[in-house]
Image: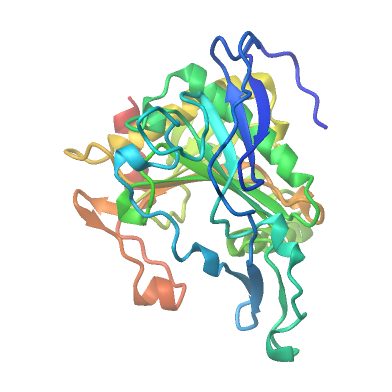
Amino acid sequence: MTTHEPSTHAVRKTSTTLADGRELLYFDDSEPWVSGEKTRDLVDTRPLPASESLSQIRLDVLTGDWVAIAAQRMDRTFLPPPDASPLAPSRPGRPPTEIPAADYDVVVFENRFPSLAQSAAAQHLPSHVDDEELWPLAAGTGRCEVVCFASDPDASFASLDLHRVRTIVDVWADRTEALSALPGVRQVVCFENRGREIGVTLTHPHGQIYAYPYLPQRTDAMIRQSRLHRDRTGRSLLSDVLATELRSGRRIVVDTEHWVAYVPAAARWPVEVHLAPRRAVPDLAALSTAERDALAGVYRDLLRAVDDFFVGVDEVPYIAAWHQAPVGADRDLGRLHLQLFSMMRSPGRMKFLAGSESAMGAWINDTTPEAIADRFREVLA
């Protein structure tokens, strides 16, 4: 358990269970909930069958990557009308949703169509596909959670007030700590997908948190590179990246007491910026109160800058993912940082990952990192 200095930002957490046994958590930062004057004693009355997962993971022996096989996700909800969103509050005159309350501040619940779940461990799976030693197989254990940022279906993360953004920072930290303690979890990643252009199936403002039972491909590669760098220099690779970007200054877009945002020297996306705390910490749960307070403003500013990046585009599609240190082995090689990027390369035009990127993993960027940084500084000024 990490100890932090007292915070004046009050958040009340209430845990309950949905009709199919999945956990739901209310994180309240407004009255009458935050003081406990009114409690969350709502019951989910939907006739849902017990939640179960048939997820499994298989090793791609050609790359060393684990691939999650989650066939139960094939028929998940896809772009329902606003009055039928499963992430909206449950209100009279509408079918009940995933959230029994008629209003809420921030809500977290286990995904109804998870890629990974603790219940997957109940499967009786062989250790290999077709009993062939070449193809390792395991249950897709872990956990996938949905984080609803606001009850308003028309809100966006960038439109939230700082009080609510600060609450979400605490929610990320809380869930990171809780999920990191689950058996077999190797990494916890908090992320948001925004925009139909990148495949978002629910437009309600929300993000997700994945607790993986293995190191995802990008993390595995970063850990390998970090180990090589430490063996060669005795230093932390991710800390050296931040120090080098600060020394150059060419791609720095935000430089504050606690946080630094920069466009990486080998940016892959036409819009990409990374955000890192000055202090080396493994994950969001390890941030101090002052660092969390500062993060609320800096992060919201970056999201607004993404929306302002292209003239004439009101909402730029993006992915925002928090890279956190592995749980257990190699934790000392990781370091918290955000990767925020968009596939949009110009108004109305997307960067599609075709032959070179998708088939060969050979990345090509259509602009320069320095030009990306110049534009970010312009819209942040």
Looking at the picture, tell me which residue is in the foreground, 245 or 224.
Answer: 224
Q: Dividing the image into 4 quarters, which one contains the C terminus?
A: top left
Q: Which colour scheme is used?
A: rainbow
Q: In which quarter of the image is residue 186?
A: bottom right
Looking at the picture, tell me which residue is in the foreground, 206 or 360.
Answer: 206
Could you tell me residue 93's position as x and y percent? Answer: 35, 31
- Left or right position of 345 against 293: left
Looking at the picture, tell me which residue is in the foreground, 264 or 143.
Answer: 143
- Left or right position of 353 against 237: left
Q: Is residue 136 visible?
A: yes
Q: Is residue 256 visible?
A: no
Image height of 206 relative to 232, above or below: above
Could you tell me residue 368's position as x and y percent? Answer: 34, 53
Could you tell me residue 331's position as x and y percent? Answer: 77, 50
Q: In which quarter of the image is residue 295?
A: top right
Q: How many labels, in total? A: 0
Could you tell me residue 194's position as x and y percent? Answer: 38, 45
Looking at the picture, tell me which residue is in the foreground, 108 or 352.
Answer: 108
The residue under the point 74% across, 90% down is 131
- Residue that sits furthest to the left in the current view: 312
Q: Dividing the image into 4 quarters, which one contains the N terminus?
A: top right
The residue under the point 56% across, 38% down is 45
The residue under the point 37% across, 35% down is 94
Q: In which quarter of the image is residue 15?
A: top right
Image height of 356 relative to 301, above or below: below
